[in-house]
Image (spheres, helix red, strand yellow):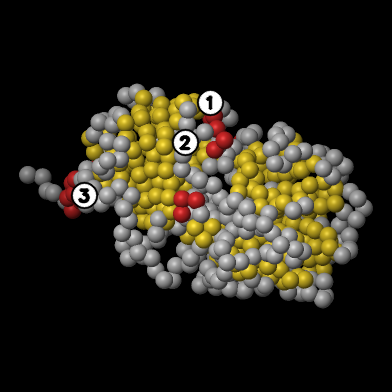
Amino acid sequence: MPMTTRRDLFKAMAVGALAAPLQGIAAGASTDTCSSRTPTWGRGIEGQRKADLGDGTYRNPIIAGDHPDPTILKDGDDYYMTFSSFLSYPGLVLWHSTDLVNWAPIGPALHTHLGDIWAVDLCKHGDRYFIYLPANPGDKGWKIFVTWTDDIRGGAWSDPIDLGIDNVIDPGHVVGEDGRRYLFVNGIRKIRLRDDGLATDGELEDAYQPWRYPEHWIAENFAPEGPKLLWREGWLYLVTAVGGTAGPATGHMVIAARARSVHGPWEHCPRNPLVRTQSADEPWWSRGHATLVEGPAGDWWMVYHGYEHGFRTLGRQALLEPVEWTDDGWFRATGGDLSKPLRKPAGGKAGAAGFALSGGFEAERFGVQWCFHQPGPDEERRIARDGDALILAASGTSPANSAPLVCLVGDRAYQVEVAMELDGNDIEAGLLLYYNPKAFIGLGFAADTVKTYQYAEELPWARVPRKNRNLRVRMTNNAHVVTFEHSHDDGRTWTLHGTRMEVSGMHHNVFGGFLSLRAGLYAVGKGAVRLRDFRYRAVAESVSG
């Protein structure tokens, strides 16, 4: 008689649990409890956290979720901001605000597939708006492109133009005292542009040797990057990030220099670094990549990114901190303890904050909410629409090579749900929590099987026989503990998946890529899946289990 191992017993119990119906819990009910130590935010659409506390103060982040490398433009009474979009397409979503705290999306500026997109610069010259962007087309090397529009609120952006600046990243635009246009890049180097900003007019050259922090400081690497420039009272200020954008919590930092000319000489700010996480006990880690911006009432602010303490899975989030100009012509950050609320910028008018994730799959949601992860050039051909439903054709053989549709989330605890209808006997579709092809979990449904994905692979021993055609699937991520459920009667009863998965390690420091965990939908094999009625809501953050 063959010996039964502990592994065999575990598999048998797990498979039984996978098929067990959820008993005693009504759909949508919650038994979560909150810790008094958990920070409180304003609550917006679907319970999503928002910065504005409604009493004249705000709590960071100003835009929750993965919004790294912020670049911000003041244009009259309006503010516009965009962020690195990496491997998501459509990309470079523009956001709008009138008070620097409440932000709502306008739409994506980039539809052409250029590979990875890192830190960009949004600027205005004359009456035209520009985005200078570094891209890595075909993973063959970094290049700087530019795209432009004459109508930032609703106009089409041009096709990206290759500026012929190779092997650099992080462009920052400025007009020199000579009236000429320049781009600064990582390093820190600069190159002159043609007057129209659409071609270079010179060679790349060294511009500035950044201030160096003491060698004993705990940082990732020196890596001077993200140059942002502005003129004020005859001085040109250069704000730079050093220390590495990830790695140790204390690594990333903001430094500054100034000069009377775009050509230097530069003097270091005596207060460097102006922003740095001093301890892993702080609420925001790896703070850096800053841009200075004037507030609605003439006061000054700094926008930068940081990882939330204990939630690197959410990516680098957009933070706002007040700035004070001092008598010596330098500035300093005055936000202090960012775990506490800060006063809002004076003079602004609060507008919309965020947007509803629940609903259909209308075309206008693409780029703003839904995007393909690492798509091929023709990936959008997989999409057809039937009213507010989306028909997604299968691609690939597993979620890892399927170019899933992903949706960015910004809450520390949330629940998503979607209805799906399988079309064909060789189709498999499902719901994921997806970082990249090396890091994801999920639940998949084939015509006759429920599949479990953990550790970025399917667990064959966990398969459960079940006929699947029309179903709903639900995922709850509560402080990194993920629970799946599925329903085959349109949500009247639910089956609890027997394995809860812990995902706190799925972030850049482990898997690279500078990304975040996102809700994802995939379809593989042959055929298509019809997706409809996506639902999202924030839930109370549980600390008791």
Q: At which x and y percent is residue 301?
A: 70, 64
The one nearer the camera, 383 or 265, is 383
Which amino acid does the dot numbered 1 rest on?
A: Arg
User: Which image quadrant: the N terminus?
Assistant: top left
The residue to which callout 1 is attached is 381
Could you say whether the residue bearing mark 3 is in a helix, strand or loop?
Answer: loop
How many labels were placed on the picture? 3
* Proximity of marks 1 and 3: CB atoms separated by less than 8 Å: no
Question: Measuring 43% from the left and 46% from the top, which residue is drawn there?
Answer: 536
User: Image point 21% across, 49% down: which residue?
Assistant: 23
Name the mark on residue 276: none
Image position of 448 with respect to 54: above or below:
above
245 horizontally vs 168: left or right? left
Mark 2 lies on residue: 360
Residue 23 is labelled as: 3
Point 78% across, 61% down: residue? 238
